[in-house]
Each structure stands twice: as C-alpha cells, then as structure tokens.
Amino acid sequence: MLEWHSRLALNDLSMSEPRLIAQLYDFTSQLISCNKVSDTFEALLDSVMSLHAADFGCVQIVDSEGLSARIVAQRGLSDGFLRAFASVSADLPCACGRALKLKSTVVIEDVENDPEFTPFVQIARDEGFRAVQTTPLMVGDGDLIALVSTFFRQPKLPSPANMTVTALYASHAAEILARLRREEAHSEQQELLANELSHRVKNVLTMVQAVSRESLRRAAGLADYKEDFEQRLSALGRAHAMLLESKWQNARLKDLVRQQMAAFGDVQMTLSGPDLRITANAAYVLVLALHELGVNAQKHGAFGAENGRLSISWRLHSGSRMICLLWKETGGPPVRKPTSYGFGSALFRNLKHSGMLSANFRYQPSGLVCALNLPASAVAPEESLVRVQRRDQRLRTG
C-alpha cells in the first residue's frame, strides 16, 4: 500500500517539482549507506529539516506498544524543551502526542491560535517557535515506530508538495529502520548466544575436569577409574541433554530426579514436591550428588535389597528460598556410618565449600537419610515464591 502511494506521489511531483524528486533520491542514497539505526534517524532529521527550512527538529522513537515516544535525535532544541518532552504519551494534545494517537501527520500552522495546544504554549514561547509539523514513520500493517517533527519560528503552513515528500522520506526511512532493527536484534542475539555457549562450555569442562581428577585420585586402578568416570560422565550427559531440550533455560526438578534415578534400573521410588525449575548450573551439581547417592544405594543401601525403597521429596523454603531435597532409603540392609571416605564424600565436601550444595547425612538403622540444600540462586529466575507457595497449598489441600 505504501509503495503504491509513493509511486503515485512521485508521478505527481516529477512534472511540477523536479527539485524535490532530486532531494528524494539523494535522501534515499543516504539511507542505503546507513548501517545503524541511529545513523538513519540523523539522516532523516537533517533531510526533513532541510526540506522545510526548519529552525528546530527532533526524531522520537515509539515504544513497542505505541503509547509513548522519546527523543533520540534533535537539532537546536534547549535542555528545557528536551526535559518537557522527554517522554510524550498518546493522550497529550501536543503535535507529537496527536500524531502518536492518530497515526497520521499533524500540522499546527500557529500554536498561538490552536486551542488544543494551549497547555504547551508557554513552552513554545520559551523555545521560540510558532509552527510545528509531525510526521509518523509506519511499517508493516500500520505499526508506528517513530515520529519526525520540525519547528518554525514564524507561523507556517508547509506546502502540499513538501508534505508529500516528507511522507515519502518517512516511508523510506521506516523500511530501512525496520530492516536495521531486525539485523541489530539478530546480531545481538547471536552475540548473546555465543557468550552464553562459551560460559556453559567452560562450566561443563571445569566440572568434567574436577570429576576426572577426583575419580583418578581415588580409583584403585585404571579399570576402576574408567568405569567410575564413565558413569559420572553419563550422568552429566543426561542432564546436558535435558537442558539442551529446554534451550539452556532451566531444568524441571522432578524430571531431572526421575531421569537420573532411571539409570539405576527398576527402583521402587516415590517422588513428591512442587513443580520447581532450577538453573543449568544447579542441575549439573544436583546430578552429581544424586548419582553418588544412587551408587552408594546400589553398593550398600536400598537399591541392592529386594524390598528396598527410595523416597525423594523437596520443597522451597519460604524464608531463605533454598531448595530442600530429602533422600530417604528404607528396606535395605542396616546402615552404618562409613569409616573410610571416597569420591562421594570429597564431592559433597567440595560442593559445600563452594556454596553450591550442602548435605547432611543421617545413618539410621532403617536406611540412609540425606538432606540436600540448594541455594536460592539455584531457583530458575521465572520461579515466583508466591506461585510456589500456592502450589504447595494446593498439594496440601488435595
């Protein structure tokens, strides 16, 4: 629709105003060379001011909802004016406010004689302008992305030809701006993803190196090291696959626990707790802890007994926002406090020292009980304490 009107306007102008056509082509050439959104705003403002021989001018960018606009480029305007119009809403009767609301060009020939402009007359007097025009920049199906305004010291009604060219300037600039914004957003997203990937890889490699080092240090031989290390690496791999599916945003705690326990075969197990999600870093930490608890249960606890059972429950502490997870084994052989310590003990000690997880072990006759605490930073950002408390309440009331 915009292209059709542009062609029609160009045909009308080419016969009567060849000078304006030349200016339009010059402006289009400038736009093509613009590589940044800010450069496009500057080029647009200079060209529109030159076209109208304006005394002052500004470009305002419109928010995503189309309800307000703020100045991003200006020529000749005072600090007082910039403060007064730092943010303009669609319900203000100034020229830019009306253009924002109507999504169409607004021209005020003399602000002194415009009743709607009365609240802003004193600002205009202080600034020294009597006339103003504001033209919207529209893209797509009528999305308003910016406004360009010019101000004149004397009352003035711009010519229809000049206003036609201004509309063409705005139309062409809007298309360039839309493209540049898409490109900048894509570039920023790619940079963000690259930085995030680098961060994730470094964290995973650091964890793998630590696991490898401790596994080798405590292994009885190369065969033991190979088996233990591969099992721990597999546990991290399962967590990695789950996080990859969620685009590295977070991991659902219940799914993570169920996935890790499935590696130990057909375990009689009950899980209970609110639908919490944890960060990627916390997921890796919890996976290592659960794996070591599972290995211990397989060698010495409930997983090696016919009637052995495991209960895992968790909650979000309402005060500290720590995630409290309780591992409870029953039905296995009698449990005694160990007299020697291996990889698992070193792991839990190091995790506690780093503040990533703390563990409290109780060696009861009925089976091992372990309370794991993840810090508040482990909770995924979108988790709301209020929402979690409401879920807990629903669980208690059935």
Image (spheres, rainbow, N blue to C red):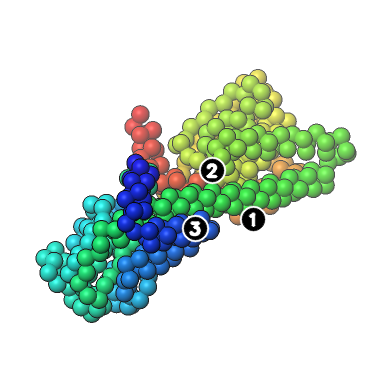
Disc nearer the start of the sequence (3/2): 3
- Disc 2 element: loop
Question: In the image, is 178 to the left or to the right of 347?
Answer: left
Residue indicated by mark 3:
29
Residue indicated by mark 2:
249
Front residue of 317 and 12: 12
Type of amino acid under label 3: Ser
- Disc 3 element: helix
Q: Is residue 257 visible?
A: yes
Q: Residues within 10 Å of mark 2 (few under 14, many from 20)?
A: some
Q: Is residue 376 visible?
A: no
Label annotation for residue 354: 1
Disc nearer the start of the sequence (3/1): 3
Q: Residue 305's spot in the image, x, y percent?
A: 67, 23
Seen at 63% across and 34% down, the residue is 241
Type of amino acid under label 1: Ser
Callout 3 touching callout 1 (CB < 8 Å):
no
As displayed, is residue 363 above or below residue 148? above
Q: Residue 100's spot in the image, x, y percent?
A: 27, 55
As displayed, is residue 74 above or below residue 67? below
Q: CA distance from mark 3 to mark 2?
A: 43 Å
